[in-house]
Amino acid sequence: MKSLRTGRRLRMKTAFWGEVQRVGQGSCRVLVEELSEHGLSFRCDQGISTRLMPGRQRAPGALFGVRVQMKFSLPGLQKPVEIPCRLVFCRRFSQDSYRFDCEFDPRENLQQQRVLGFLQRQQETSGSAEQRSGAA
């Protein structure tokens, strides 16, 4: 996992499996590629993207009114993070590869604090590793 710091925001490139579930549908396995204190990005196939798109929308782009439940595990946390999100954008990378950007529900403060704590620990760990390699 690679930690990126942009201004005061913490963001990290990732590669772990999570689950996304739209209300009234079963959960789908997705690849979480980026995690921040305010949201995440995940990659999925065309079948899952079709299930997540709102109403009649079939083309990638901005998404409105799509709420999902995300569930994923982070190293060092005993319980998985389960947090409601709002899908905000979809990108198509190839015929069978789509990336969705999600924003965490701001009312889910406890779950966001767990994610933020994880990101801060990762930043501290990568920062001290960089200092050790620079001193060698």
Image (tube, rainbow, N blue to C red):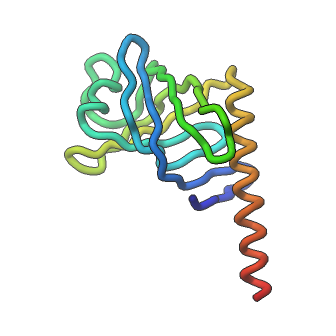
Residue 115 % position (x, y): 67, 39
* Quadrant holding the N terminus: bottom right
Q: Which of these two is toward me, 81 or 109?
A: 81
Question: Considering depth in this image, is 132 or 97 the residue closer to the camera?
Answer: 132
Determine which quarter of the picture holds residue 112. top right
**Residue 69, x across and y down, in percent:** 50, 23
Query: Where 84 sits versus 17, above or below?
Result: above
- Check the image and name the residue furthest to the top: 24
Report the number of discs.
Answer: 0
> What residue is at 59 percent from the left and 61 percent from the top?
2
Which residue is at the far bottom? Answer: 136
Pick the residue in front: 51 or 20. 20
Residue drawn at (52%, 30%), measured in percent from left and top?
71
Residue 74 vs 14, above or below: the answer is above
Q: Which residue lies furthest to the left in this view?
A: 95
* Drawn side of residue 108 relative to residue 18, left or right: right
- Could you tell me residue 116's position as x and y percent? 72, 42
Identify the residue at image location x=69%, y=49%. Answer: 119
Q: Please give left or right for residue 89 compared with residue 47 in the image.
A: right
Q: In the rendering, at what x and y percent does residue 118 appear?
A: 70, 46
Q: Quadrant of the C terminus?
A: bottom right
Q: Which residue is drawn at 54% across and 26% down?
A: 85
Q: Which residue ends up furthest to the front in the rendered image? A: 78
Work out whether residue 101 or residue 126 is closer to the camera in this orientation and state it: 126
